[in-house]
Amino acid sequence: MELTINAQVRVLDDAAVDPSMPLLWALRDVLNLTGTKFGCGVAACGACTVQVDGQAVRSCVTPLSAVAGKRIVTIEALGSTDKPHPLQTSWVAHQVPQCGYCQSGMLMAAAALLAKNNNPSDLDIDAAITNICRCGTYPRIRAAIKTAAAALRGDAGKRPVAKALA
Amino acid sequence: MKRRALILSGLGAAAALVVGWGVLPPRSRMGGADTLPKANEEFGLNGWIKIAADGSVLLAMNRSEMGQGVHTALAMLVAEELDVSLAKVRLIEAGPDKLYGNVAMFVASLPFHPIETEPGAESGTVKTGQWIVSKAARELGISVTGGSSSVADAWDVLRLAAATARAQLLGVASLQWKLPLEDLVVSDGVVSHPSGPKAHYGELAKTAAATPSGDVKLKERKEWKLIGTAAPRIDLVAKSNGTARFGIDVRQPGQVFAVLRHCPMLGGSPAVVNVDAAMKLPGVERVVRLGPYAGSTAAVAVIGATYWHAKRGADALQIEWQAPPAGTLDSAKIMLALEAEARHAAEHDGGFAFHQRGDVKQAAAAAPRKLEQVYRAPYLAHAALEPINCTALVKDGKVELWLPTQVPGMARALAAQVAGVPASAVTVHVTYLGGGFGRRLDVDFVGQAVRIAVEAGGRPVQLVWPREEDTTHDFYRPAGVALMQASLDAQGLPVALTITSAGDAITPRWMERALPALAGPIDMPDKTVSEGLFDLMYAVPNQRVAHVATRSGVPVGFWRSVGHSHNAFFSEAFIDELAFEAKQDPVQFRMGLLKHAPRYAAVLKLAAERAAWPGFGAARALPAGRARGVALHESFGSIVAQVVEVSLEGGKPRVHRVVCAADVGTVVNPGIVAQQMEGAVIFALSAALYGRIDIEASVVKQKNFPDYPMVKLADAPRIETYLVPSTRSPGGVGEPGTPPLAPALANAFFVLTGKRLRELPLVV
């Protein structure tokens, strides 16, 4: 079976996988892409969130048969060390993670939101981020999404006062 | 026997058995230059610190990072005293040396009232108890990340280790350059003299190990550059790009996976297992029966090529289960039994009295009014987001473990026992923990993983529990009931307080399963059952606070803030009732009872001011339909007050804002403190609104997040954290934000609806 993951075609041994296997386990246990996490197995917690054709998808209930031929992006390709995604920059700036386990899923869900809407309201964020964080990083996640959205819009660092004076 | 005599004789006996009285006083915790494993281009200076040739400082990390920021906080202590930037500190594994044991946590487990342990004012009994326990803890050297104790435990030890290392490094420079020590300056690990000589630590380290440190002086507070700053955490870049490695991310060559099914009935076991259907599935290799390990319920595991293959195999097993021999468990019946126990003990001066002052009976007889209420709290699961897991390799008489644990030494001991090898043949690698909250103080899953690995033909096996197994086979926060009785004077002020609670003791059960060598034939009084009740600071002249320690048979464990998690609800919601009875404002009422306790009053005042509580700071009217509630609670050496603002939206509670004020002693990193307070508030909010584990016929009814729900982002309140400046030694940070939330919320609901909620979770 062939999958397009992080802009690379990955060939999975048909003896090792099955079309009904959830994407999560192909990523984690076959391809060793362990940045995507297992939390509940029933699409309730969002730790396994990846993007499929730009949509945030819970990979623990998404069979491989449903993603063949589609563009799969995982946390490993959200940004790079040299060029982190604006969310990753704002995540560190706001000191978001605690244990960190849910954060891959949070970031992938947030990135899917910002790709469609670079000026999300609180309600937009509420609707898009339904993942569970047991450490309670939610208020910082909300703030970090807004900071990253501002950066994507090109507003970063520009304060209204400075604008007015200029 | 009097309470103190009992405690001290028990401790004395334990200490004498364990260490003997000949070894006095408690040994240094510095460790020698050869404690840490040798490596090329690394030079050990003591048991904690090595210097690499490039000038990096290698710190032996003895505490588990589970989100609480401990890796950063401990690295900061070392960086401060060594005058290096945080970026220059690299963490290395601490290993099993007893040096790395936790002393502070065991000292804090003594059931003394905070009045008795106030630094500088300790009684002889307190000093003796603390001495015995610190000595025993040092000798035992049990490495535990828990009890919000890590910074308190490391505070003197790590700063001294770093300051000594610095003195040795500077001593070398002084000797080599023949220049006076006091003229040398250090900047980010580079030692220099104004006349020109310059060398970084890496160039001085080899000789430093053999150079005496001379006089070592810790920095004065005013000299601190790093401690007290919100330095960015050292683990957050990796936690924002998927590279942080948790236990479940361990990948070793040839690794296979295992998934298990416990007997659904707690304490039960598999009777007949038909493996035929499972073994026919592709990728399924083997089925392994698992007995009980360290308190677990017996189970059956399937080894497979991936988690998914193993899970499908486990699902395909046909198993006839055998009910537990000890009889069935039913949480509703247990709640009734606890209430009966509490009532009986209250009538007969029963239970173990953790605190007594004055004469409750006499005061009650003379009091014109009484108030009596029963408070209840259910069992709770931890539900850390990283499922329970452990990777084990058993090969050639050796065991290697990779796991998220709060107790690496206990994991090692159990692994050795299960594999039948000496502990010295077991190597433990502690990964990041995807949440701990106390669940990973238990090692049941380690015994299971090692047993499976024994059957895996020398290949590493990663055991991963499905979420449902975690929810249904946790070590639960014990259910609790408290009978709260107050006698009021003519003004409605409390003159006597009797609190009689009932619930399972955690520590003796945990010792039995995780530390069997130290578990005694009888249960010692367990402070955790009554913490948050017996240790109240309110000036009520007559008190009896007692607890009936029950043995329900339900597996119980430590859950973030432990006894405080429900006892603070009992005490602070009842105090609010007393304020109402006295026709006083809840903040003013508490202030009136805390005149002798300025540290507590200051925290409460700060919270009230920041929340614009009527009468404090700039008055701010709440929007219509919104109400405030307050609670104040000390735990783990820190005092936290919270003011919660709540409304009802479509009949459902909506928490808008939580103002959190805290005195956590000296603050190492205020950014981490704020993170922990926010996290604790939300953790406690999930429990207060939704948390309950029900057990029927020994089966836990809740299975996964859909029926054991959590607060999500849309429900999360705005949280503000304010700190009272303090020069005391550091208190706890990870847990103390949890206890006040539920009572503050219940107290707010009362203002909003006029209804007192005396049972968790709070159902409006």
Image (spheres, grey):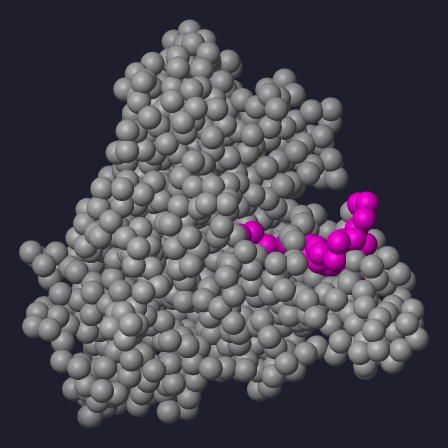
Question: In the depicted view, which residue is nearer to us: B134 or B391?
Answer: B391
Q: Is residue B494 above or below residue B89?
A: below
Query: Does the segment drawn in magenta span residue B539?
Result: no
Question: In the depicted view, which residue is nearer to us: B339 or A90?
Answer: A90
Task: Say whether residue B136 is left or right of residue A97.
Answer: right
Q: In x, y percent, where is residue B98?
A: 72, 54
Question: In the depicted view, which residue is nearer to us: B611 or A82?
Answer: A82
Q: In x, y percent, where is residue B109?
A: 54, 65
Task: Say whether residue B574 is left or right of residue B382.
Answer: left
Q: Is residue B156 above or below residue B59?
A: below
Q: Is residue B706 visible?
A: yes
Which residue does the image show at 89% across and 61% down from the upper left? B207
Picture mark count = 0
> Where, by quadrant of the figure, is residue B217 drawn?
bottom right
Q: Quadrant of the N terminus of chain B?
A: bottom right
> Where, by quadrant of the figure, is residue B560 drawn?
bottom left
Q: Is residue B7 visible?
A: no
Q: Magenta part of the protein: which range?
A: B38-66
Q: Is residue B157 above or below residue B256?
A: below
